[in-house]
Amino acid sequence: MDETGNKVKDVAIIGAGPVGLFAVFQCGMLGLSCHVIDALPEIGGQCTALYPEKPIYDIPGYPSVLAGELIEKLEAQAAPFEPFYHLGQQIVAIGKESSGFELRTSCGDAMRTKAIVIAAGAGAFGPNRPPLEGLADYEGKSVFYMVRRKEDFAGKRVVIAGGGDSAVDWALSLEPLVDRLFVVHRRDKFRAAPESVKQLHALADAGRIELIVPYQLHGLDGQDGILSAVNVATLDGQERTLEADFLLPFYGLAPDLGPIADWGLGLDHHHVHADPATGATTIDGIYAIGDIVTYRDKLKLILTGFAEAAQAAHAIYKQIHPDTPLHFEHSTTKGLPDA
């Protein structure tokens, strides 16, 4: 803490997705401490919010790894460096100081750092909400846009709405736990991985899932935020009532750069220009890595972001310690703190 009570660390990393988490590790290996800020209520970015049980095939060393498992590994890798997480909030104010930056979040958290790393992917995410009357009364009680604990739905009647990877993946994941499961989609074709769609139809054929197609959400029944039924309708007005305890609308997340868009970084179609060798932006002390970055021949891959995280960490060390040469050691010889 400084004299005003603000939390002090070397680097503020905006974005707790896979690239942001790996940046914590890379900074930590160079002795740099980190704040991590994310608009979502938990770490993982899109890997957690959109497709936690979807396999990823292009992570080095993993022929296949579930997105959620990858986040768990990255969190464990960052843990020895004790990052301070500020989740469910955004940076709303940023001030330049002689020694770095002062930042304040939408929840009132304040911090001072010497450098900022933007690892925000496509920006902050908020759910695409269905246009249902009284929806807000049920949110957080009976209507959820992401699943934190599958066990919360055990033995319950659940309606999943949507036709993409998130809807299909969570239907497959929750089916063994719930009492009854409906999947509502406005078309009879799903926009998910073919093998997942095949499994979904197999469960439907076996009577373990009911596919409600082609229907759309039409209304909610319940009291005091506790759901009793979900009303659905076809485009020609045919209606059905589905008795339910929970509604999980998976219509994707709407990206929004939020306050980052007002920082004067010279955005290009919601992307930040950065030096591919260092991650440096047009503002001294602010770096950008991952999918939010644009430069010539940029590849939007997680592994590209991992490399950018390492390059930015080294650039930040030189910025913070201009008179201290960095005697780089490989992790195999340096080891981890207290290891």
Image (tube, rainbow, N blue to C red):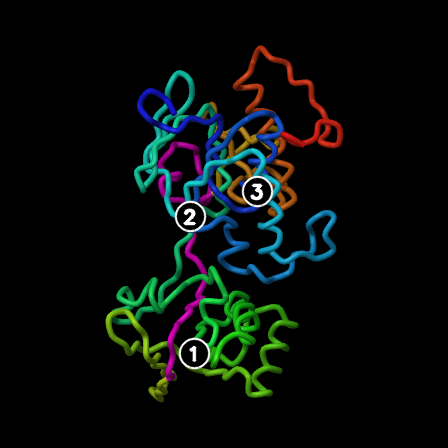
Q: Quadrant of the C terminus?
A: top right
> Which residue type does callout 2 highlight?
Ala
Give the Cα separation between the discs numbered 1 and 2.
31 Å
Question: Image quadrant of residue 204?
Answer: bottom right
Work out whether 160 lies above or below 313. below
Q: Residue 197 in the image: state x and y as whole percent.
A: 60, 75
Q: Residues within 10 Å of mark 1 (few under 14, many from 20)?
A: some
Labels 2 and 3: the sequence-earlier one: 3
In the image, which disc is placed on residue 157?
Answer: 1
Q: Residue at x 32, y 64 (%)?
A: 139
Magenta segment includes 224: no
Question: Image quadrant of residue 93?
Answer: top left
> Which residue type does callout 3 highlight?
Val
Give the Cα separation between the discs numbered 3 and 1.
36 Å
Per the image, the residue denoted by label 2 is: 124
In the image, which disc is placed on residue 128?
Answer: none
Q: Residues within 10 Å of mark 3 (few under 14, many from 20)?
A: many
Q: Which residues are magenta?
A: 242-270
Q: Quadrant of the N terminus?
A: top left
Of residues 209 and 75, which is closer to you in this image? Answer: 75
Q: Secondary structure at mark 2?
A: strand
Q: Residue 134 in the image: state x and y as whole percent.
A: 25, 69
Magenta segment includes 244: yes
Q: Residue at x 52, y 81 (%)?
A: 188
In the image, which disc is placed on residue 19?
Answer: 3
Q: Residues within 10 Å of mark 2 (few under 14, many from 20)?
A: many
Of residues 299 and 114, which is closer to you in this image? Answer: 114
